[in-house]
Image (cartoon, rainbow, N blue to C red):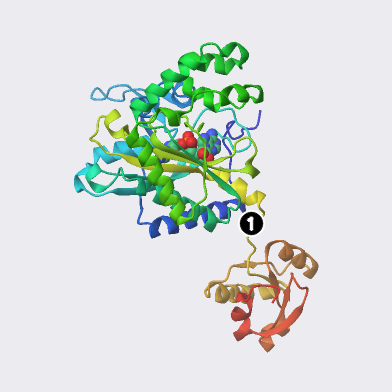
Amino acid sequence: MATLKAVRGTRDLLPPETALWNRIEATARAVFARYNFGEIRTPVFEDTSLFSRGVGEETDIVSKEMYTWEDRARAQSEKPQSLTLRPENTAGVVRAYIEHKLGETGQLQKLYYIGPQFRRERPQKGRYRQFSQIGAEVIGPPSAGSESPLRDAEVLEMLATLLDELGITGWTLDINSVGSSGDRARYNETLRQALIPLPPKMCEDCQRRAVTNPLRVLDCKVPEDQPIIETLPKIADSLDEASKSHFAAVLAALDAAGVPYTRNHRLVRGLDYYTRTTFEFTHGGLGAQNALLGGGRYDGLSEAIGGPKAPGIGFAMGEDRLVLTLQALEAARPEKSDAYIAPLGEAMNPPALALARELRRTGLSVELGDGTFRLKKSFYAADRIARRIVILGEDELKSGILTVKDFSTGIQTRVPRAELAAMLKVPSGQ
Ligand code: HAM
């Protein structure tokens, strides 16, 4: 019988890598708390129409990548319903905002989420069919200041802080404005006209997009098409005065806060709900799938799914890609335990457990070996998973003086039991 494996595009996360996932999530939660964000957890599946109306029927996500099924009715009172595993979480958050009438508080809602998303994409490094996003949204009635360019700049400044605190060095922030929905429609038409004579020289995808969705031509990565794309009209020239000054104010606040950015007039993003500010943070270490995170403003999304006017801005980080980046930066060497206790002989197992308990209760992470192991085997095991080894034999137990070896220096010392915990808390090598 063929062995069963995780489905294509999904994977198991195992220790020690899961420790890195947990560290990323803990850092994100701590940073979000400093900016006064609260956590929201929405269901993993939703009514399909939430995504077709919210994200947009013509987008790649909705037209080709969703896991959608017809859910059977189980009782007379139920109707069959088309359901979809969420491909992203912004539409779900805005649905919850409307459903729970959060706008009626009159306050800005600052919500973050961490969880799995699902897209039927072609799997490759950094691109999975189940992946995890860490995202946040700032949304509220205009009277709460939700349209202010300061919200955009504050979210971007928070992201710069979060990436720095995660230890992700060398990121680049690309930023653009796609204007109001009117500006976008006007620009789409301008592009359509400009593209009429060009497609025969361009790739097949561009030939199709030139007709169906001209904006997507700007996403093309085919090298031969790039000089042609560079000659196309730019969206900045289609923005109305209000969108232009909004964008200028976002950039001015970023300058004041010292957040570096690059203006990228081709950054239009693949979801239909964006208005005005759009952005992406990329990292060179990721290869083809180099977007660490993406986001932007979505001033009309609430109304598009039947809610009140509720402008918003947010982002989602690809957690899988944060992990890959940190691993590549070697900032994420597997966490080692503080100590490995090696009992000498089976009789030392019970006192070794007592010693492990004593040390762990002081907050130390401790691995416990086994008295049946030869000392050589204990050293071998300990060197791989712990910073130091503590040897517990009959002499040590009686005298209360333990032998400790620091693997980074190779130095062996004898330490009174009462001082052991404090000594193990000193970083190794010192
Ligand atoms: P998105 O650009 O579709 O935006 O996804 C955000 C991030 O999720 C990407 O930059 C990438 O890091 C990660 N990601 C996307 N697809 C995959 C995949 N197949 N495998 C691994 N990682 C992936 C959104 O989802 C918007 N909801 C962001 C947003 C929030 N905009 C406003 N608020």
Q: Residue furthest left?
A: 104
What residue is shown at x 38% (from left), y 22% (from top)?
186
Of the 4 image quadrants, the one containing the N terminus is top right
Percent x, y of residue 18 = 57, 51
In the depicted view, which residue is nearer to us: 57 or 394?
A: 57
Provide residue 268's location: percent of width, then percent of height: 47, 31
- Please say whether residue 380 is visible from this viewpoint: yes
How far from the left and from the top, in percent, is residue 141? 24, 42
Of the 4 image quadrants, the one containing the C terminus is: bottom right
Secondary structure under tag 1 reads: loop
At a point 36% along the width and 40% down the height, the residue shown is 245
Rendering coords of residue 379 (x, y %): 76, 67
Residue 89 seen from this side? no
- Residue 242 as seen in the image, left or right of residue 85: left
Amino acid carrying mark 1 in the image: Ala
Residue positioned most to the bottom: 399
Q: Would you place residue 63 above or below residue 99 in this image?
A: above
Residue position marked by numbered label 1 in the rendering: 331
Number of marks: 1
Q: Residues within 10 Å of mark 1 (few under 14, many from 20)?
A: few
Q: Is residue 183 left or right of residue 170?
A: left
Q: Residue at x 78, y 73 (%)?
A: 410
The quarter of the displayed image where residue 182 is located: top left
